[in-house]
Image (spheres, helix red, strand yellow):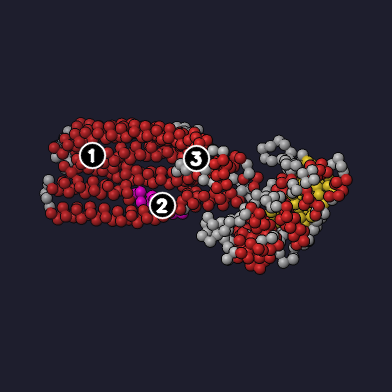
């Protein structure tokens, strides 16, 4: 039988792989849950069986020793199972609380290993959001699998225990026939009647339960998206201090709240109503089946008790066994439906985890902390040979037939209008993307032939959209817990943060951001950009790449930073992107990109002489605002 386009066998294979993947996230957790579920399933049967034995003894021989033995066994076994269950509950609770964070860490670790071009794709971002949202916002994926397996184990054990009681009941009926207490036809009719009752009630409740979970799945399949809208508007956008000014000045609060209601809360509320209606129908069907089945079972086993085929206590035991067996079948049907629906979330998880990974060196080399260069690395020559590139899924060439040689120690400025391909050129050099055609050489070797960690140690970057973390200033600059304090301080001074560091009580050990550290401090936009520049200086790589590194600085600070860069990085090969052409005057050479092509190159004065050239027109456009 197909569901969501898959056969039962396919769904079972997905579930089995999901269990194996879960054990990678939380090893041993599911085993603890299975043991606890089995204990929880068998515990009620102790009371059922022992109560029947005690009741039979009370209306029978009334042997005090046997009565006391039954009572002690009942109490002892219940206490033992409850104690083991409590112990496992504690371990399970601790493990489950780690599930969401460990799951997210595993996704993040995978993201680090996925090629950058995949991370930038819209389909990848949507997939990551679906995987994270399914567990964090709707309880799907691995979280649902965890609890579903718990219910499956519990109800299989319950059905097994009820079946054993049923076999014992069947044996007593057959013994009654042999002893002549009831006729063979009556005995057969009783067994058939009970079997039909169990089968009929189980089928009815199973079908109702499956429909209920189908409704839940239809409602919350897009729950992650709904919650994402709600969280963005009400938790991220409204309270954000940077957005608060616009919200107040333009009176956007009503608009935002209406949008979050429309895209999130109303849809979730409508879905909840549908789910509650389906749940109500299931509860009614269960109650009706339990009532009808209970009356029938009481009538049949009561008749057998009157004929002395079974003891009085067995009447209660059989009613409980039949009721729990039907409930177990109903729960199994419901959970199997949920498991099959949940496979949609598991398949998204598998798709994400199965994505190709970048080939890196050994784990030891990957985690080695970068250390300042001691002078052993020589300046590097960079050559672009007929490099063309188009983004995956796009038909437009962003770069076309780029031929460029950057000499060792040369300072090269890259200019051009927005969309001309400047940042893409840098991304290719950083091995974030592979050229569609052509090759990039570093000291005569194709950059893709270098081991990744070896290559990346040769490059230091300062992007316009850089990241600083809630670590100490020193750890941000060194990008490591281990650092050379003198080198960190020197890099910060060269970046223009000397006065700032002197004002801090802990100096370079001061934490960035007071959101996470009580004594943390916030950097202004310009100061943060200087810290990013200090990080590039500290790495002391032979190739330095600057992509609008001074965008947040005022003209005085920008001039100071550029002069310090050229003064302190005299031997390094430098590539710098800047929209402020005044900074290009310090470079040895300037290249101009337009429409993905290299249209001009030369020094500042040479390019200005070409009055009809792209660079001269860009210079004139900027200069007119200063004249």
Look at the picture and state if 578 lies above or below 286.
below
Q: CA distance from mark 3 to mark 2?
A: 36 Å
Residue 155 x/y as whole percent? 34, 43
Residue 32 drawn in magenta: yes
The numbered mark, 3 or 2, whose residue comes first in the sequence reads: 2
Count residues near mark 1 (Cα–Cα under 10 Å), then give few for <14, some for 14-19, many for 20+.
many
Give the camera-side residue of 118 and 42: 118
Residue identified by numbered label 3: 230
Count residues near mark 3 (Cα–Cα under 10 Å), then give few for <14, some for 14-19, many for 20+.
many
Residue 341 drawn in magenta: no
Q: Indicate left or right for 228 with 328 as reference.
A: right
Residue 294 x/y as whole percent? 23, 35
Q: CA distance from mark 3 to mark 1?
A: 49 Å
Give the camera-side residue of 226 and 559: 559
Residue 87 x/y as whole percent? 35, 56
SS of the residue under disc 2? helix
**Residue span colored magenta:** 27-38
**Does the rendering let one see residue 605?**
yes
The quadrant of the picture occupied by the N terminus is top left
Q: Indicate left or right for 112 with 199 as reference.
A: right
Q: CA distance from mark 1 to mark 2?
A: 32 Å
Q: Is the C-beta separation of discs 1 and 2 under 8 Å?
A: no
């Amino acid at each position: 039988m197909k569901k969501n386009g898959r056969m039962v066998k396919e769904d079972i294979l997905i579930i089995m792989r999901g269990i194996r993947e879960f054990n990678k996230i939380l090893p041993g957790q599911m085993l603890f849950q299975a043991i606890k579920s089995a204990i929880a399933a068998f515990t009620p049967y102790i009371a059922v069986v022992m109560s029947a034995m005690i009741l039979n003894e009370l209306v029978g021989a009334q042997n005090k020793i046997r009565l006391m033995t039954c009572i002690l066994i009942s109490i002892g076994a219940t206490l033992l199972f409850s104690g083991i269950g409590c112990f496992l509950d504690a371990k399970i609770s601790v493990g489950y609380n780690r599930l969401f964070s460990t799951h997210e860490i595993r996704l993040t670790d995978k993201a680090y290993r996925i090629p950058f071009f995949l991370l930038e794709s819209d389909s990848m971002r949507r997939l990551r959001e679906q995987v994270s949202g399914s567990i964090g916002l709707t309880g799907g994926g691995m979280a649902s699998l965890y609890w579903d397996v718990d219910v499956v184990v519990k109800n299989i054990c319950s059905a097994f225990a009820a079946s054993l009681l049923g076999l014992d009941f069947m044996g007593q009926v057959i013994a009654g026939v042999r002893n002549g207490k009831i006729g063979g036809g009556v005995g057969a009719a009783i067994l058939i009647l009970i079997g039909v009752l169990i089968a009929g009630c189980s089928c009815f409740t199973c079908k109702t339960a499956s429909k209920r979970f189908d409704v839940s799945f239809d409602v919350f399949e897009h729950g992650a998206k709904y919650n994402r809208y709600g969280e963005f508007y009400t938790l991220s956008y409204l309270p954000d201090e940077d957005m608060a000014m616009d919200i107040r000045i333009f009176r956007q609060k009503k608009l935002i709240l209406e949008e979050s209601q429309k895209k999130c809360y109303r849809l979730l509320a409508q879905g909840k109503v549908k789910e509650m209606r389906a749940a109500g129908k299931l509860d009614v069907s269960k109650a009706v089946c339990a009532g009808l089945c209970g009356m029938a079972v009481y009538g049949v086993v009561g008749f057998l008790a009157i004929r002395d085929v079974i003891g009085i206590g067995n009447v209660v035991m059989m009613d409980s066994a039949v009721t729990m067996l039907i409930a177990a079948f109903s729960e199994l049907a419901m959970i199997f439906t949920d498991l099959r629906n949940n496979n949609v979330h598991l398949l998204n998880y598998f798709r994400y985890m199965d994505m190709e990974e970048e080939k890196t060196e050994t784990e030891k080399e990957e985690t080695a902390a970068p250390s300042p260069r001691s002078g052993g690395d020589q300046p590097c020559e960079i050559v672009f040979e007929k490099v063309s590139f188009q983004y995956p899924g796009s038909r437009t060439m962003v770069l076309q037939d780029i031929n460029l040689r950057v000499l060792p120690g040369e300072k090269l400025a890259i200019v051009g209008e927005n969309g001309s391909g400047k940042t893409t050129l840098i991304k290719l050099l950083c091995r974030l993307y592979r050229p569609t055609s052509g090759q990039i050489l570093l000291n005569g070797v194709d950059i893709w032939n270098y081991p990744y960690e070896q290559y990346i140690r040769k490059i230091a970057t300062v992007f316009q959209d850089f990241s600083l973390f809630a670590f100490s200033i020193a750890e941000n600059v060194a990008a490591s817990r281990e650092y050379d304090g003198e080198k960190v301080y020197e890099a910060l001074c060269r970046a223009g943060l000397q006065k700032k560091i002197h004002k801090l009580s802990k100096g370079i050990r001061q934490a960035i951001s007071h959101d996470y550290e009580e004594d943390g401090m916030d950097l202004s936009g310009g100061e943060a950009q200087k810290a990013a520049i200090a990080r590039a200086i500290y790495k002391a790589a032979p190739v330095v790449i600057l992509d609008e590194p001074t965008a947040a600085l005022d003209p005085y600070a920008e001039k100071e930073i550029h002069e310090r860069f050229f003064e302190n990085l005299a031997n390094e090969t430098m590539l710098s992107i800047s929209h402020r052409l005044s900074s290009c005057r310090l470079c040895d050479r300037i290249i101009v990109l337009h429409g993905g092509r290299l249209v001009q190159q030369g020094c500042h004065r040479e390019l200005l002489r070409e009055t009809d050239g792209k660079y001269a027109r860009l210079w004139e456009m900027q200069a007119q605002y200063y004249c």
